[in-house]
Image (spheres, rainbow, N blue to C red):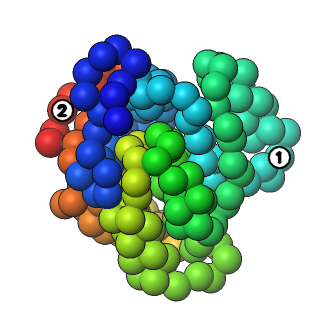
Amino acid sequence: MQASDGTAGAACGMAGAVLVLGGARSGKSSFAEGVVTRWPRPWTYVATSRVYDAEMRERVAHHRASRAEGWDTVEEARDIAPVLDAAGARPVLVDCLTLWLTNLLLDGCDIVAAREGLLSALRRRAGPTVLVGNEVGLGIVPDNALARRFRDEAGLLHQAIAREAGRVVFVAAGLPMEMK
């Protein structure tokens, strides 16, 4: 696959995966969109958020409005592996892994099985995949069991993807730092 800027495209499978990590409002989503839009259209945007209130509805609307034309959006809160399979060779952006993990935890899902299912789908990918996640392990130890489990599972998920991904980028203050 060739990117729109004339450079060679990413490999497939996990070698073609780019993991973009950062804190809240770090610029990670904008950076990730920029990575995907270097490849030819059409692009698939996998949105994992659930809308629970008016503020979240506004955030989702802002995200949609700020995207360039050419995105096909798939809203999937839990079962993203089939979406990745269905995308074929199209470039895919998954935003975000930590919202996906939140949905799984709140719904009482088997986190290990879900993580392994995601990794398997990423290994099968016929096109590039960019995944966005919030780095939540840099703060204090949370004061309750659910929050500690979330922090731990997010760290394990990011480590599992980072081990096999072709590229890992950390974004802080809008500045990308190549980690791998």
Look at the picture and state if 144 lies above or below 113: above
Q: Label 2 belongs to which residue?
A: 178
Q: Label 1 belongs to which residue?
A: 53
Secondary element at image label 2: strand
Q: Position of residue 125 (x, y in %)?
A: 40, 58
What residue is rendered at 52% in x and 58% in y?
84
Per the model, the C-alpha gap separating discs 2 and 1 is 35 Å
Q: Quadrant where the N terminus lies?
A: top left
Look at the picture and state if 63 lies above or below 158: above
Of all residues shown, which one is farthest toward the left?
A: 180
Secondary element at image label 1: loop
Q: Position of residue 28 (x, y in %)?
A: 42, 32
Of all residues shown, which one is farthest toward the top?
A: 5
Look at the picture and state if 141 lies above or below 74: below
Q: Quadrant where the C terminus lies?
A: top left
Amino acid at pointer 2: Glu
Relative horizontal placement of residue 107, taking residue 165 as reference (left or right): right
Q: Nearer the viewer, residue 130 or 111?
A: 130
What residue is rendered at 59% in x and 82% in y?
109
Q: Quadrant of residue 104?
A: bottom right
